[in-house]
Image (cartoon, rainbow, N blue to C red):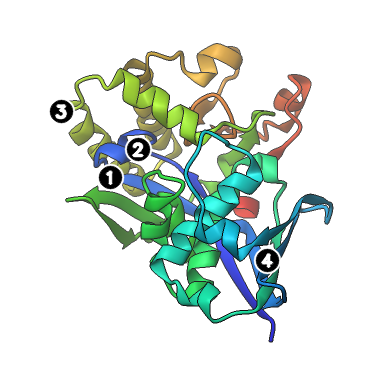
Amino acid sequence: MEKTFYSNGKLLITGEYLVLDGAKALALPTKFGQYLTVSSGKNQEIHWTSFDKDKSIWFQETISFTEIIKYKKSENQSVKSTLIEILHEAYLLNPEFLNSSEGFTISTNLTFPKFWGLGTSSTLINNIAQWLGINAFELLKNSFGGSGYDIACAQNNSPIFYQIIDGKPEVEIVNYNPDFSDNLYFVYLNQKQNSKSAIASYYKKQNNLSAVLPEINKITVEITEAITLEKFQELLQKHENIMSEVLEITTVKNNLFSDFSGTVKSLGAWGGDFVLVVSNENPTAYFKAKGFETIIAYSDMIL
């Protein structure tokens, strides 16, 4: 019997990095996501195939139950090793899924190009958790790591506030649909950022955050309350300036788009993936002239 599961992709609008330390973040589920389809197999093996948006196969492997059960963590960061680690942690949370099965044939199908960074891993983890009836946040923590905001986006169909309080994820649905959404765009920076590496780099810095966290929390709430485009831009810029000091990294606008008349804000891990662009006019021509071909309107991206 075939079963199919789906999870939303994500974009983190505020609180990047600091969400790991308890900051309140605004996160938006995307119209793009990933499907996972499971059917029965044999030989106590999982035959796994992963399809990109264009239907091309980007990963294909046969994994034995023994490899999953006896997995030992290593420095190997290959796709296969990472997948086995996730399945091993899933097995520890629900051993029955292997103990009572002959095998599985599994396929994953992305509705966005995998290099976009909208949550290839988080949508996979949430889909596996749905399939096996386990806690997706726990599975993420035990395998891939991270704050969990991406899991919350995978599970919700509307904007959310996300915050870790006393070590536990708190998700609050936000009624967020800005009147000026026609002025908002998402631009892909032509390189996928490694979330694990970015988090490790952030933890090495670990500047004094006691004064920064309340300020970011305040900005996060004020952004959802901003009525005018000007106020929204002011808050985004303030957020960028604070994070630039915390991370000791130049803002993406100063680095790449200093001559752009609108606002540009990094989303998630700085240095890759998408940025949020605020502009009075359609900025497509400007970014294409600079070699950035993927410009997506807010209404085409956000669920």
- Among the two numbered marks 1 and 4 on one chain, the one whose residue lies closer to the N terminus: 1
Q: Which residue is mark 4?
A: 46
Identify the residue at image location x=58%, y=28%.
272
Going by the numbered disc 2, the residue's amino acid type is Gly
Q: Position of residue 294 (x, y in %)?
A: 72, 37
Q: Please name whichever residue, 199 or 95, is drawn nearer the observer in this view of the structure.
A: 95
Residue 71 relative to residue 273: left or right? left
Q: Which amino acid type corresponds to the residue marked 4 in the rendered image?
A: Ile
User: Dot 1 lies on which element?
Assistant: loop
Q: Nearer the viewer, residue 130 or 302?
A: 130
| Residue at image point 26% right, 37% down | 21
| Residue nearest the viewer, comparing 248 with 90 | 90
Q: Which mark is residue 230?
A: none
The residue tagged 2 is 15
**Label 1 is placed on what type of residue?**
Lys
Does the CB distance between marks 4 and 3 fall below 8 Å?
no
Q: Is residue 215 or residue 16 the one in the foreground?
A: 16
Disc 2 or 4, which lies upstream in sequence? 2
Residue that carries the numbered disc 1 in the rendered image: 24
Q: Quadrant of the C terminus?
A: bottom right
Disc 3 element? loop
Look at the image and tell me whether residue 303 can be seen: no
Q: Earlier in the sequence, mark 2 or mark 1?
A: 2
Of the two numbered discs 4 and 3 on the same chain, state the one appearing first in sequence.
Answer: 4
Marks 4/3: CA–CA distance: 47 Å
Which element is circle 2 on? loop
Q: Looking at the picture, how far across and down is residue 270, in whole percent?
A: 49, 26
Q: Residues within 10 Å of mark 4 (few under 14, many from 20)?
A: many
Which residue in the structure is indicated by mark 3?
Answer: 210
Q: Nearer the viewer, mark 4 or mark 3?
A: 4
Categorize mark 2 by other alpha carbons within 10 Å: few (<14), some (14-19), many (20+).
many
- In the picture shown, does residue 94 fall above or below 215? below
